[in-house]
Each structure stands twice: as C-alpha cells, then as structure tokens.
Amino acid sequence: MKLKIKLFLVAVLSVFCFYSCSTDDNPVPQVQVDFYIHFNNAQYSALQNPGGWVYVTGGYQGIFIYNFNNETYYAFDRACTYDYHHSPLIYNEKTHCLEHSDTTENCSSKFDVLLQGAVHNGPAKFALREYDVLVYGGYLRVLNGLGY
C-alpha cells in the first residue's frame, strides 16, 4: 500500500513539474506580438512572392518576415540570441542569413532563415525567436500567443 502511495506522489510531482517548468530557454525577452499585414499595402508587396521579405516594427528588436513558398511564411525577432542588446540583425540575401553587417555592433552569430532561424555559425546556442504566421487570403497575422 505504501509503495502505491509513493508511486502516486512521484507521478503527481512529475506531472506538476512538467506543466510548471518553462520550456522557453531562448534568452531574447518575450513581448506580446499580434498584428495583421495586408498584401495590398505597397509597403508589404515584397511578401507576395517567394523569397520576398520585409522588416516590421514589433517584437523585441523588430521583426523580419519571409515568404518561403506562398504558403509558408517565417517571422523572426531581429534580436541575436547570443547578445540581444546589440543592434537588430539584418538580412543577407546571398547567404539567406540574419546577421550584423558591421563589426562594432556584432554578436558574431549568423542565423539561417531557410532553416527556421537556426544558428548558422557563431557563439549563439539558440535559434532566433520565431513568431507564428497565419495566412488569411489577402493578409498575414503574426502572433506569439502572449496576452490571451
């Protein structure tokens, strides 16, 4: 009988820890993101074609949105996960990486957009903070679920 009680307590504690422990180890601070982009707006027309991309305000250091194939869009925070205090990352179309272009404001890491923001090289250990992108006909919704 005592063994059953101990096993039950271990199971309950395990479930409690599983649901209460945070799985988000990304060092870039989370901020609420929830906005819409209309493709008809000239400012976002680049998103109408695969490979098109734009910068928008929001997130921690601004957000980069990329049209992968007209069905899949990626949205990443422009903050480096190695040191998010540096200036926002910029997109290098030749390497398909978000990186710093100068050496004075540089976190020394590059992130591959085509591999969902994974670290391409450098000291960063975490991929870019990614936001959800939902496609609704003529517009996109970018969000992260905070504040619901």
Image (cartoon, helix red, strand yellow):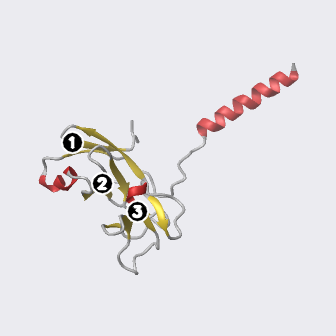
Secondary structure beneath label 1: strand
**Does residue 49 show up?**
yes
Residue topped by disc 2: 65
Sequence-wise, the earlier of marks 2 and 1 is 2
Residue topped by disc 3: 79
x, y (%) of residue 13? 71, 33
Give the Cα separation between the discs numbered 3 and 2.
14 Å
How many C-alpha atoms fall within 10 Å of the one at disc 3: few (<14), some, or many (≥20)? many
Secondary structure beneath label 3: loop
Q: Amino acid at mark 3?
A: Ala
Q: Amino acid at mark 2?
A: Ile
Secondary structure beneath label 2: strand
Front-lying residue, 9 or 119: 119
Question: 116 above or below 89?
Answer: above
Residue 87 figure quarter: bottom left
Residue topped by disc 1: 139
Residue 2: assigned label? none
User: Residue, x 42% and y 75% (percent of image)?
Assistant: 106
- Quadrant of the frame with the N terminus: top right
Give the Cα separation between the discs numbered 3 and 1.
25 Å
Q: Residue furthest top?
A: 1
CB under 8 Å between callouts 2 and 1? Answer: no
